[in-house]
Amino acid sequence: MKLPPRTVERLSKYRRILMEQSSEEEAHIFSHNLARLLNITPEQVRRDLMLIGLTGNHRKGYNIQALLKLIGKTIDSYDPQYIAIIGMGNLGRAVTAFIRKSESRLRIVAAFDIDPMKINHEIAGVHCYHVSETKQIIKKLDISIAILTVPPDAAKNIARILTESGIKGMLNFTSVHLDIPDDVYLKDYDIITSLEEIGFFIKAK
Amino acid sequence: MKLPPRTVERLSKYRRILMEQSSEEEAHIFSHNLARLLNITPEQVRRDLMLIGLTGNHRKGYNIQALLKLIGKTIDSYDPQYIAIIGMGNLGRAVTAFIRKSESRLRIVAAFDIDPMKINHEIAGVHCYHVSETKQIIKKLDISIAILTVPPDAAKNIARILTESGIKGMLNFTSVHLDIPDDVYLKDYDIITSLEEIGFFIKAK
DNA sequence: TAGATTGTTAATCGATTAACAATC
DNA sequence: TAGATTGTTAATCGATTAACAATC
């Protein structure tokens, strides 16, 4: 199914926010109520739900269970998608712990580092391999997504290894620009740029 | 000066990438060379530079020093903008260390937590205050940007306190949707949603 | 002058919002 | 029926890309 990236992001958020406040709530929700939970417009909600083919009730709104089920069917993959995290420094460990705490289907199944103290230990609940094993382990464990939390000078090289290993998506926390093929879905989390952007837009003049 | 958010982001990246590989390089750069460094089109580079009023040389391209200086003048604030980080758990400490290591003008001047072990200590190089002091410290130290790395259930309350303290921008690492006034510039770093988005776009079918 | 690059406007693309008929 | 909401198309907005004259 073909969906705009922004719609996919919102579907993920609809699901999370509705799962959090489930049970206690009603069985149905109106587009304007769901919109208010995320500070967006009701039109946007209706359009997103239309795109995934959910049809609501003109009296009661959208059935929440049906909505959750359809979002799952739309954005989740049938086969589990496994995640690796490369670089188990402070940021790597923190991100790993963060994801493991979240109630999501996301499964981190391998960590990689070069520190001998970490290799073959559980770090933040995940087995840590040496970076030199990246290619084999990624293939062996059928890992399709990588999270990059390595130091800047290691980023480009690791990105190359990951692409060669057949990784399909990357979340890049390093502030380094990665030049990878188009068929790898890359999402940059550039903290420095984001803070500079915030800085610009709140400037007095 | 009024600039599109995407342009501001790219200006930040032009600067970073040019500073990294400075000195050794030439004094000038062509739009297509700068474009290639970031995998964007030369048109986009020229348009961005046009927007900030930089004029290049038809023979030699853009003067790198002039470019860097103008980007600084455009996106940096004259008065320093101070940053606070709220929540000194794993993620908070990692993000703090990450920013401090970066060569940028970004200055984290205060951290906040509720753990008595941390209060009044230096954590990741930053003095840690108790969350109850947030409002006073933010005003006293003239902090305009906050980074939120608190647990999900604390997020909404802290966001309210921050807004009341007059914060102007926020980088939100919690996966919680924050309902804050329009005059606070909010940037969400929703790791779970981003990974689910990647998952969707790399799906087989 | 010929060739390459800049600077800028127009066209296109993608996403959001407005509008409103259909329906419960 | 009257009123509220959905579903969907059209209009708008923002950002990117194409096109090309001006210029070194």
Image: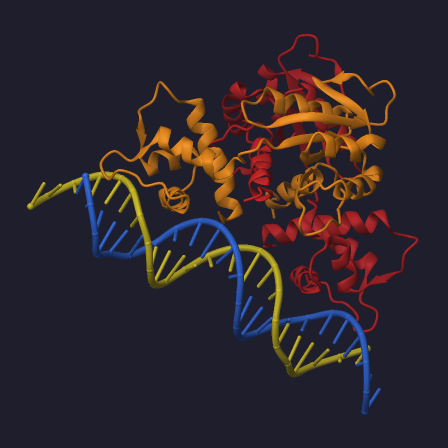
Chain colours: A red, B orange, C yellow, D blue
Q: Note whether A37 is above or below A205 in the view shown.
A: below
Viewer-nearest residue: C18 or D17? C18
Q: Percent position (x, y) of residue C11?
A: 36, 63
Q: Which residue corresponds to the image point at 60% horizontal and 40% vertical from the top-left?
A: A198
Instruction: Name the quadrant containing residue B185.
Output: top right
Q: Percent position (x, y) of residue A2?
A: 58, 55
Viewer-nearest residue: A174 or B204? A174
Viewer-nearest residue: A74 or A141? A74
Q: Residue furthest right?
A: A24
Taking the image as drawn, is residue B141 in sight?
yes
Q: Residue furthest front?
A: B140
Taking the image as drawn, is residue A91 in sight?
no
Q: Which residue corresponds to the image point at 81% horizontal and 52% vertical from the top-left?
A: A18
Q: Percent position (x, y) of residue A7?
A: 64, 54
Q: Percent position (x, y) of residue B123?
A: 75, 18
Q: Note whether B139 is above or below A113 in the view shown.
A: below
* Count of picture labels: 0
Residue B166 as seen in the image, left or right of residue A113: right
Residue B96 as seen in the image, left or right of residue D3: left
Viewer-nearest residue: B171 or A110? B171
